[in-house]
Amino acid sequence: MTVPDRPTAQAVPQGRAQLSLFARNFFKHPRMLGSIIPSSPFLVRRLLSRVDWERARVIVEYGPGVGTITREILRRMHPEATLVVLETNEDFVAFLERALPDPRLQVVKGSAETVQAELERLGLPAADHVLAGIPFSTMPTTSRQRILEDTRASLAPQGSLLIYQFSSRVRSDLQRVFNEVESDFEPWNILPARLYYCHR
């Protein structure tokens, strides 16, 4: 029987710092984060199961926070792929730059509304996958619509938007913008999450 690795002495304080930073920012910006703790491993695994790791060369993540999903993307993605994360929170940007020194990672202080412009600025082609857990349901309607339309335009022909939400209210917007929208559910998360896989 394989004994699971124990966290190192260094990893435990780092994990606590990560949770503390996330919680502090939740209380400062609850409408931006949606949950007081990062995503569960079950949710992360279900979300990432739809990524074509062998083919994907450009992956984008909106609102990476303290990098719970970011770390797993970097662990799985191709050595020649690039991950662009768009984060508006300066504390999270500084944390990601310090905690994840991976040359494949581009940390951008910016909004999901500018994804096309950021890909062009970085000299990257269209995205194979965009992943997000940003709370679409609490956004102003115009911002939500702008992000979804710009995301669709930034995707490669076979690209997809993969998101998780704690409300089903965004589904009708997704169906207006994308040709195909699949839904899924992950109960093992705080809060239980709805997942949507959207294709151009």
Image: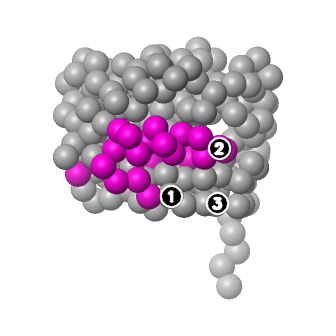
Q: Which dot, 1 or 3, sits closer to the camera?
A: 1
Looking at the rendered structure, which numbered label has been put on residue 186? 3
Say what secondary structure mark 3 lies in. Answer: strand
The image position of residue 23, as x and y in percent, is 78, 30
Residue bearing mark 1: 183
Q: Is residue 145 visible?
A: yes
Where is residue 47? Give x, y as percent.
51, 55
Q: Residue at x 63, y 27 (%)?
A: 138
Residue at x 54% of width, y 60% of height:
184
Relative placement, left or right, of 118 versus 189 is: left
Q: Is residue 198 above or below residue 109?
A: below
Sequence-earlier tag: 2 or 3: 2
Is 161 a magenta residue?
yes
Q: In the figure, is residue 149 to the left or right of 100? A: left
Q: Estimate how packed mark 3 is, as few (under 14), some (14 to 19) or many (20 or more) residues with alpha carbons within 10 Å.
A: some
> N-terminal of the two: label 2 or label 1?
2
Q: Residues within 10 Å of mark 1 (few under 14, many from 20)?
A: some
| Residue stretch rendered in magenta on the structure | 158-182
Q: Residue at x 34, y 44 (%)?
A: 178
Whole-angstrom CA distance, mark 1 to mark 3, is 11 Å
Say which residue label 2 marks: 167
